[in-house]
Image (cartoon, coloured by chain):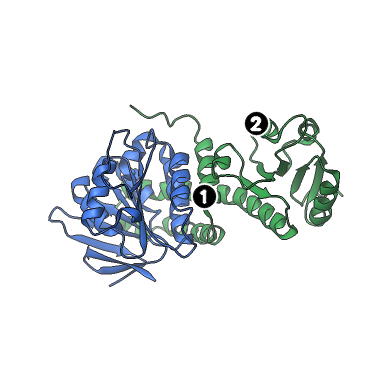
Chain colours: A blue, B green
Amino acid sequence: MSYPVEGFDEARSFDDGVSLLLAGAPALTDGRLFDAVAPRRGETAVVVTTNTSAARVAEELLDRGADGEQIGIIDCTSQESDVDDDGVRVRQLGSPGDLTGISLEFAKLLDDEGDDAQVRVGFASVSTALMYTEQQTLFRFLHVFTARISSGGMFGAFAMDPGMHDDQAYNTIRAVFDAESEVADDGTASIRGTGFEG
Amino acid sequence: MTDSDQPTVLVVEDERALIELYVRWLGDDYDVRTAEGGEEALERFDGDVDVVLLDRLMPGMSGDEVLEAVREQDTDCKVAMVTAVEPDFDVVTMGFDDYLTKPVEQETLLETINRLLSRTEYADLEQELYALVSKRAALEASKPAEELDESEEFADLEARIAEIRAQLDETLSDVQDDEFVAMVRELEGDGGDEREGQE
């Protein structure tokens, strides 16, 4: 099994267990992230959002053909947000810095899925989360999170804006991921690393 | 029966028959201490204890209270709760590292203790990984790529990072959701109180 995607230059699908870093300004990476995590038939999507309302996350995924039942959202934005579709499961958290809360809600949203479930995980964005946590804590969190994605045969897409961090912080965090895609101003997404098929 | 090479497990259980059973199962591989209640558990507890197997419902001091006292001592000891009913994930956010549902089987008990011990090892490796990766990032940010390509020290750094990653991948290859939550809770605890966000 693998995760087919569209819009990445040299990658048509990602292998089970792979985590991808989407690097670029949010205006560029948001769309790519939704493209990457929109669930196909039989799949589930769980999106952790720190900067986009749950309503918009749901709308973007529904627009890409998902059913409400396929979508779980962990909303750390502290914004009031009404999701129209009753099937979408939304969990509210007080802060992007509540990493235990994120992991707990993630586990609960997937509690009913079997071990062989196909799950796409989105995280937007790592940059916002870094404003609320120590760099080392976030690095360790992302390492454990991507390990869970790997052991569960899921696929993860994490957005980060290099422009918001110094080179050292960015290079440290990006070491967690298997593959990375830089989204250019013209919208093209180059890709490097491991775990994808052309 | 004290062998300093063996990890130490403290079994806290008010049913004597169960204590005897657990001691029989664990005695060969671990240095086992036992306590029949919460107060006794705290007398037997010290920095040498690696894993506490803690019955949640006991007369007198409850498992939750013992847990709290153990956590106050700030060791990296792991605590597995033994309970009569399957608990919710929420239990790991309370400070337990894992849980076992009664009746506990030998294989499950040994597996759980092993897993908890490897998690301690994991935390050490993972901190080393962070230290090395951030060092590499600092070098990359301050020196030209050509210079790093020729540096033996940088090559050693890369090799060590790859080695630790491989070990961590191996340790984490079958991490499940409850462990995932417990590990995140633990690493957040290590981070101290710096995670106060802006409103």
Residue occupying image coordinates x 53% and y 37%:
B190
Q: Residue furthest left?
A: A186
Q: Residue furthest top?
A: B199
Q: Amino acid at mark 1?
A: Phe
The residue tagged with tag 1: helix, strand or loop? Answer: helix
Residue occupying image coordinates x 28% and y 54%:
A22
Which quadrant of the view contains residue B73? Answer: top right
Comparing B161 with B21, the one in front is: B21
Which chain hosts label 1? B
The residue that label 1 is drawn on is B180
| Quarter occupied by the N terminus of chain A | bottom left
The residue that label 2 is drawn on is B68
Which chain hosts label 2? B
Q: Residue furthest front?
A: A86
Which quadrant of the view contains residue A166? Answer: top left
Percent across and percent down for residue A3 are 34, 66
**Residue B2 visible (yes or no):** no
Left/right placement of residue B28 relative to residue B144 reads right
Percent across and percent down for residue B42 are 76, 32
Percent across and percent down for residue A36 are 28, 59
Q: Residues within 10 Å of mark 2 (few under 14, many from 20)?
A: few
* Circle number at residue A190: none
Residue occupying image coordinates x 42% and y 49%:
A142
Percent across and percent down for residue A191 are 26, 63
**Residue B4 visible (yes or no):** yes
Comparing A7 with A107, the one in front is: A107
